[in-house]
Image (cartoon, rainbow, N blue to C red):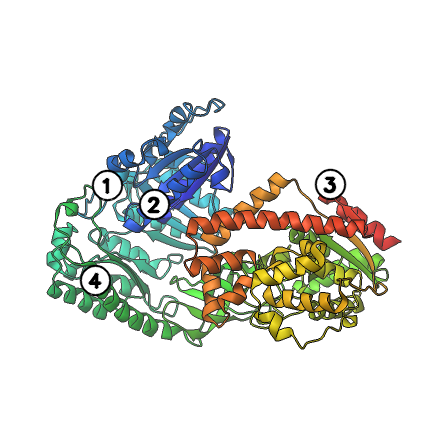
Amino acid sequence: MTYNIITIGCQMNVADSERLRVYLEKLGFKNEPNFLLSNLVVFVTCGVKQAAEDRIHGLINRIYKNNKKIVVAITGCLSDRDDLQKSFGTRVKIWFNISDLLNLDVRLKKYFSKIKKISPKEKNYLELDVDYSSIFSALVPIGNGCNNFCSYCVVPYARGREVYRPAYDILKEVKGLIDSGYKEITLLAQNVNSYSSENNNKIIKEFGFKSKRAKIDFADLVSIIDDMKANFWLRFSSSHPKDVSDKLIKVLKKSKHICEHFHLAVQSGDNDILKVMNRKYKIEDYKGKIKKIREALDFKNGFSAAITSDIIVGFPGEKKKHFNNTKKLFKEIGFDLVYISKYSPRYKTASSYLKDDVSMLEKKEREKELNILLRKSALQNNKQYLDKELEVLFEKIDRKGFLIGRTRSSKIVRIKHKISCPQRLIGEFIKTKIIKVFEFELEGRIVDFVDSCASVSSKEITKNNDKIKSKTNGKVVVILGPTASGKTSLAVKLADKFNGEIVSADSRQVYKGMDIGTGKDLSEYFIKNKEIKCHLLDVVDPKDIFSLADYQKQAFSAIDEILKRNKLPFLVGGSGLYLEAVVDNYLLSNSKPSFEKRDEYEALDLTELQNRIKKINKKFFNSLNNSESNNKRRLARYLEVLLSEKKFVAKKGKRRYNFLILGLNPERKIIKERIYKRLLDRLNNEDMVGEVKRLNEGGVSFERLESFGLEYRFVSYYLQKKISYQQLIDRLFIAICQFSKKQMSWFRRWERNGAEIVWLEDKEGSGKKIKEFLEK
């Protein structure tokens, strides 16, 4: 039995998913990364905005179209929507409130007979064990539900009335996280300020709480956590303005760990609208709370506190005069960030019975006006950081290799760096100097950091590789296989073990800016906090031509450079022609076709070029990979060669190096599953469509993009509205699967022509093969 959880919405939904994951695995389910291959798909839903609801509709329709046997379950804010239950019908089998998670096994038994019997001791789902998504930043729910009934909000209906966890359980969880080295704790509830729990002797004894009052409120809870001895940051969300107490503000002022960032949703700057929203405060109250918060938090760490909020524009009855009061509030407060939503009626909320009398055009205009004010205040606030040094908690390395982190005030910081092993900074507090400021992010430079990776690496090399240093000259390890066979991950491990560097043999990764579609994941080249150098990535602009001869020349140069440094070169890729050109030392300069008809050949359409080459040498055409067989300029070049020699025979010179060729060929089923998972990830999570769009906007024509084949070809079709999004997924999946088969055909043909490829049944055996190769 397999499961997949799709989480949409707020941090509370993420925290719920962390508990749901543990619960399902206790029942005997195993996680399946590809939701379309899973037996059970659970949606943890958001009902705050229509866009989130629309996304769920699309995903469920895809599941139903792909495999009607998948059991779909819905929880979260949409779980009690009877209109959705009716419209989805049998496509969704299970609807459950997250508060009823502990009884989900009863519902699942109808569809899964092998569910394990468990007897949970927990009375509340929030007491379940947690599989934290991060190893340094934890979301800790302190309660669930809401009693406020704002007229536009579904949360009280979806999550029920407020229920809070015992203070002792929360404190024990937080203490355990801090003792385990977690650097950031975020307390979560729909309204943290309403928190209330029983006090007891355990809390007094174990956590040194001095008060013997019967109840512990949110200010007490935060104060106890703040007294814990460790280096960590403390955040909380969400707060309701009416419940921010003076007692809490006093705790903020004396705290050591609470971050200088306060999110306080206002929703409107006008009292009339706030009354219809049932917010239970006036705008004067809100401004008074913000003033007190700033007095407590400003300049505790040398900077003014960041204030963020939520606003709804176009609420029923919002006239221009009401909206002007919201604009006035923006100017007075000077927010750092505001989540601006265009009002959409939510099912059976009080406001859904009001006339939605502000047009979408007007809502968009109001959103635009507020964003102009917001960008102005955000930039002004960020100027205080320029040329200043501050602590940053680094969270990740993005696709382009930038370090991404946050300040205590929750400002995003982006770092360009030349650190040997930047991954070791993830989850660490690092002093950073801000060198540029923008509206919603900062750019920094790390200070006072000793890049010790190089020295550590040198010690490891001295210890582990003295024996092979003198043996690497002239020896090269090749790792080949079809797409999604795991070449790169294996090569990185082996290069780390044998003091090596990688030379890419990928016909598309040589192009700058073609990152997502080619799988050019720079983070893959880090292992054990050490970067494995990779050559021949980002060599040329995609508008320019990069020939086989160009590749061969640069590959030889890279290999020679690696060998001169007594390191072991690993030639890694799936482009058969590129691999052969290096291994078999193609004498490309021998091909001297006439260039007189080059313009004529390049003017031919793709189909005509393909047909002419097939007619001259069909076997050669069938050996081309997908990218090559759809690249007009490359086909024109091949046609020149074929016509000049009447047949394509790549003349080979004497091999320049001694090669060990290792091959990976997982089962077709595994390859197809990996291809599909990676395809969905690139489309849904990594913005592959956006990458192709940016390349086109940067001057790379759609015709040129199509010539690169696969992702770039089909996404270009989609952007030109030649195919639908679903056709993009379906056709691209088929094309990549066919491409992987062609790759294997090329490698088998190469074997028949004399190449000695050692096909690895077990990746673990690769190290032994290399050791034997080096010792010969």
Q: Which residue is mark 1?
A: 156
In the rendered view, tell whether residue 763 sits above or below residue 548.
above
- Identify the element where label 1 is drawn: helix
Q: CA distance from mark 2 to mark 4?
A: 57 Å
- Identify the element where label 3 is drawn: loop
User: Which of the two discs, 2 and 3, labels the residue nearer the N terminus?
Assistant: 2
In the rendered view, tell whether residue 85 sits above or below residue 751.
above
Residue 43 placement (x, y as % from top left): 38, 40
Q: CA distance from mark 3 to mark 1?
A: 56 Å
Mark 1: which amino acid? Pro
Q: CA distance from mark 3 to mark 4?
A: 61 Å
Q: Which residue is mark 2?
A: 210
Mark 2 vs mark 1, foreground winner is: 1
Q: Which residue is mark 3?
A: 761
Q: CA distance from mark 2 to mark 1?
A: 35 Å
Q: Which residue is mark 4?
A: 361
User: Which of the two discs, 2 and 1, labels the residue nearer the N terminus?
Assistant: 1
Residue 37 placement (x, y as % from top left): 50, 38
Residue 174 placement (x, y as % from top left): 43, 45
User: Which of the two discs, 3 and 1, labels the residue nearer the N terminus?
Assistant: 1
Mark 4: which amino acid? Leu
Q: CA distance from mark 4 to mark 1?
A: 30 Å
In the rendered view, tell whether residue 736 sits above or below residue 371.
above
